[in-house]
Amino acid sequence: GSGTMRGQLERLLEVAELENVRLQVLPFHAGGHPCITGPFTILSFNETEAVDVVQADTIASSVWVENEAASSEYGDLFDRTARRGLAQRDSTRLIEAIRQEM
């Protein structure tokens, strides 16, 4: 319901204030984006020699990518998608406007 949605939007706005969080909205009008194939998580490590590890969900299972070339491709996908999103300030304004309408 609208009460639950309003609470979720308020929580997003709270989390967006944290220093280690960058909240961006990818608006519908941005159209298709590079990450449309499905969700994935990039795990990065502080050690300079460590390679990023990627966990990607598929219809039937999860896939773990642990080689530098492939994990770099996922990083590029993420970066290209993030560039299409709204800036954090604009994203939080949009979320606040939607929250107030509820």
Image (spheres, rainbow, N blue to C red):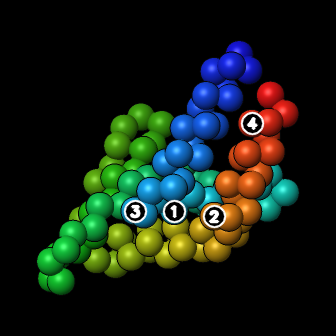
Where residue 45 appears, x then y in whole percent? 21, 69
Mark 3 in CB contact with mark 4 (< 8 angstroms): no
> Can you tell which mark lies on residue 22?
1
The residue identified by callout 2 is 88
Please report the residue visible at 28 percent of the width from the left and 67 percent of the height from the top.
44
Q: Nearer the viewer, residue 41 or 101?
A: 101
Residue 78 versus residue 92 in the image, above or below: below
Residue 3 location (% of width, % of height): 68, 19
Q: CA distance from mark 4 to mark 2?
A: 16 Å
Q: Which residue is mark 4?
A: 99
Quarter holding the N terminus is: top right
Tell me: 42 left or right of 4: left
Query: What's under tag 4, amino acid-wise?
Result: Arg
Residue 70 placement: quadrant: bottom left
Which element type, helix, strand or loop, lies under badge 2?
helix
> Sequence-wise, which precedes: disc 1 or disc 4?
1
Residue lying at 54% horizontally and 38% vertically, measured from the top left: 11
Q: Are marks 4 and 2 in contact (CB under 8 Å)?
A: no
SS for dot 4? helix
> What amino acid does circle 1 point to?
Arg
Amino acid at the residue labelled 2: Gln
> How far apart are the two marked residues, 3 and 4, measured between alpha carbons?
23 Å
Q: Residue furthest top?
A: 1
* Marks 2 and 1, how far apart at CA: 7 Å
Rate crowding at label 1 as few (under 14), some (14 to 19) or many (20 or more) other CA atoms within 10 Å.
few
Check disc 3 and report the residue beneath it.
20
Q: Does the residue at mark 2 contact the one at mark 1 (Cβ under 8 Å)? A: yes
In the image, 96: left or right of 66? Answer: right
Q: Residues within 10 Å of mark 4 (few under 14, many from 20)?
A: some
